Amino acid sequence: MSEKKRYDRFTNGKLNEYVDWLDEDGRIINASDGGIIYVDGVYYWYGMVLRPLPVAFHGQGGQTTTVGVAMYSSRDLYNWKYEKVILRSSDDPDSELYAPMRFERPKIIYNEKTGKYVLWCHFVKNPGDHGTTPGTAEAGVAVCDTVCGDYEWLGHTRPIDDDGLVRDSTLYKDKDGTAYFIYDRDVNDNRCLHIVKLSEDYLSFTKEYRRIEAAYRREAASVLYHGGYYFMFTSGLTGWKTNPAKYFRAQGLMGEWVDMGDPCEGDVTGTTFESQSTCFLPVEGRQDCFILMAERHNTENFERCSYIWLPVEFPTPDTMRVAYRESWSMEEVWGSR
Ligand code: GAL
């Protein structure tokens, strides 16, 4: 595990800056729009490996992968060790994972009943362009017996019905172990976030779902639970361009979600601090402490996107706020443990 302790803070940089986050071997952490799962004292950070294109090809399709989903590990969230590729794209033109393609916004949750780790993503087949035809706007699923093993691809599908294209997606596992797939459902450009209850083994969808009416034309969703409320952070639909964030609040995941406006304090440029949300990370051993993981997309060179991690604040029990910090540590913000 992380032996070489180089870092003791998160560095987001100035709003107009890209900062490389390096692993223990000094290589760029290449884990796009994924998430973090905590298992037995270790955080596992995973995400899609984007392509380090030569300079002449910058800006041309580096947002797809020819590798798959990679995993890193850490005990302190500051220092990361590269582990391995846990879900591979394929070199075989006959494979549905033929690269370049996308395992976009992968998320992993653990199923206590089956003892398996389940990964869902927004799957886009070769050549990795979002589309409307089968294979180009899907929910993809993979499974593994261990958190950092070789995930077995189980295929792709569309929740609710085939009319609804799958765009950005995320997972949320509730306190009672019930899990939900949340996605931007696109029916002839009528796009709205939907939340769908997963089956007990998390490998398929149930018929139970809700259209989150308030979250019309929103994406990049992530959910946390705090003080009796579920909070959902989202972005608008401007592709890789930044836009103002908006959050929603509910007392039940399948209940009424209310539009709470932009949680980004002092975001004068209306750009979510020049980033787009990725995921919420509950910090282990610190009650009520969450990190918003976001990314500053670098469309010139996707491998050099910047990670933007910020502490989440709750000014009152029923509101949430995020302020920008160029650099911070958990100890400074939340005290030593
Ligand atoms: C973003 C979305 C990303 C990706 C991109 C376009 O808005 O959040 O996940 O789909 O558009 O490729």
Image: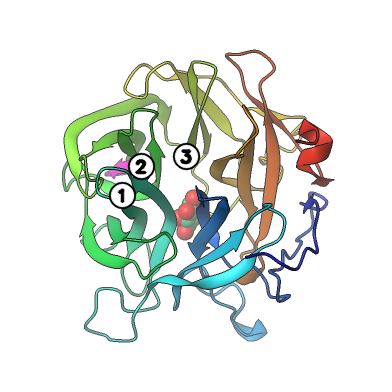
Q: Find the magenta span and give its range.
A: 182-189
Residue 183: give its label: 2
Q: CA distance from mark 1 to mark 2?
A: 7 Å
**Label 3 element class:** strand
* Mark 1 vs 2, N-terminal side: 1
Amino acid type of the residue tagged 2 in the rendering:
Tyr
Residue at the spot of label 1: 166
Q: Position of residue 308 (x, y in %)?
A: 69, 50
Question: Which colouring convention does the figure follow?
Answer: rainbow
Residue designated by label 3: 221
- SS under mark 1: strand
Q: Is residue 137 magenta?
A: no
Q: Nearer the viewer, mark 3 or mark 1?
A: 3
- Image height check: is 239 above or below 59? above
**Residue in view at x 61 percent, y 46 percent:** 293
In the rendered structure, which amino acid carries the disc numbered 1?
Val
Foreground residue among 101 and 189: 101
* Circle nearer the N terminus (3, 2): 2
Q: What residue is drawn where x is 80% and y is 34%?
A: 333
